Amino acid sequence: LAKTTQPISMDSYEGQEVNITCSHNNIATNDYITWYQQFPSQGPRFIIQGYKTKVTNEVASLFIPADRKSSTLSLPRVSLSDTAVYYCLVALPGYQKVTFGTGTKLQVIP
Amino acid sequence: EPEVTQTPSHQVTQMGQEVILRCVPISNHLYFYWYRQILGQKVEFLVSFYNNEISEKSEIFDDQFSVERPDGSNFTLKIRSTKLEDSAMYFCASNRQEGGYNEQFFGPGTRLTVL
């Protein structure tokens, strides 16, 4: 299981785009990169998953450079309700022993 | 939209007592999981369950813990003799694990308080 490193915390003003970068230097060839969001006292919620290049859904975009040693979660125009902890996970599809790191605590400021 | 449900939302118990935490995974999911999160700490994997047996477990999941799928819908976590350090949020999750897609759907959690 590849080790991941993310900033512990970030602040952003409402309406701004937020980019959270995760380093995963030891990513294996078949690993996927997955991001989850967790609000206080709730379970984590899947945001987006990707293998390479760019993935976009209605919530976020995920940018993965060619070497795949890092990835960036991009949240467009954040609102106060985006205040949460964001986790980057790297694992084989089907890997069950998912390990959550400390994540990045995003605080959105009015 | 289907969701994972958990009961109770909050359980208070005395040290040494047995507790059973209940989960109803999403109906067409095949893999089931329990995680715990001690207040202010990381989400920790406990166990995964597939085809009526444990497929992976962590070091935390010792002999005091057991899981069961007693019928076609419920998935339970039993803690045989609770300790103070078992106080945490316990999350159940489920997924289908189709192809390269590995999204796990988490329930709202049960807050366990051991006194």
Image: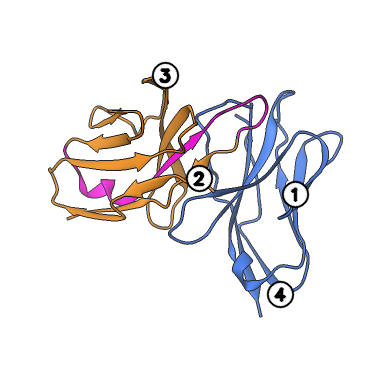
Chain colours: A blue, B orange
Q: Which mark is residue B51?
A: 3
Do the residues at discs 4 and 2 belong to one chain? no
**Chain where mark 3 sits:** B
Q: Is residue B86 magenta?
A: yes
Q: Residue at coordinates 54% horizontally, 49% vertically from top-left?
A: B1
Q: Identify which amino acid the numbered label 1 is placed on.
A: Asn
Q: In this picture, which residue range is highlighted in magenta? A: B81-102
Q: Which of marks 4 and 2 is in front?
A: 2
Q: Identify which amino acid the numbered label 2 is placed on.
A: Pro
- For label 1, the residue is A57
Q: Residue at coordinates 74% horizontally, 23% vertically from top-left?
A: A29
Q: Which of marks 1 and 4 is in front?
A: 1
Q: Is residue A47 left or right of residue B21?
A: right
Instruction: Specify the quadrant of the image occupied by residue A41.
Output: bottom left
- For label 2, the residue is B2
- Say which element carries label 1: loop
Do the residues at discs 1 and 3 belong to one chain? no
What is the CA distance from the residue labelled 2 to the residue labelled 1? 20 Å
Q: Do the residues labelled 1 and 3 touch (CB within 8 Å)?
A: no
Q: Are marks 2 and 3 in contact (CB under 8 Å)?
A: no
- For label 4, the residue is A14
What is the CA distance from the residue labelled 1 to the residue labelled 4? 20 Å
Q: Looking at the picture, tell me which residue is in the foreground, B56 or B100.
A: B100
Q: Residue at coordinates 61% horizontally, 57% vertically from top-left?
A: A8
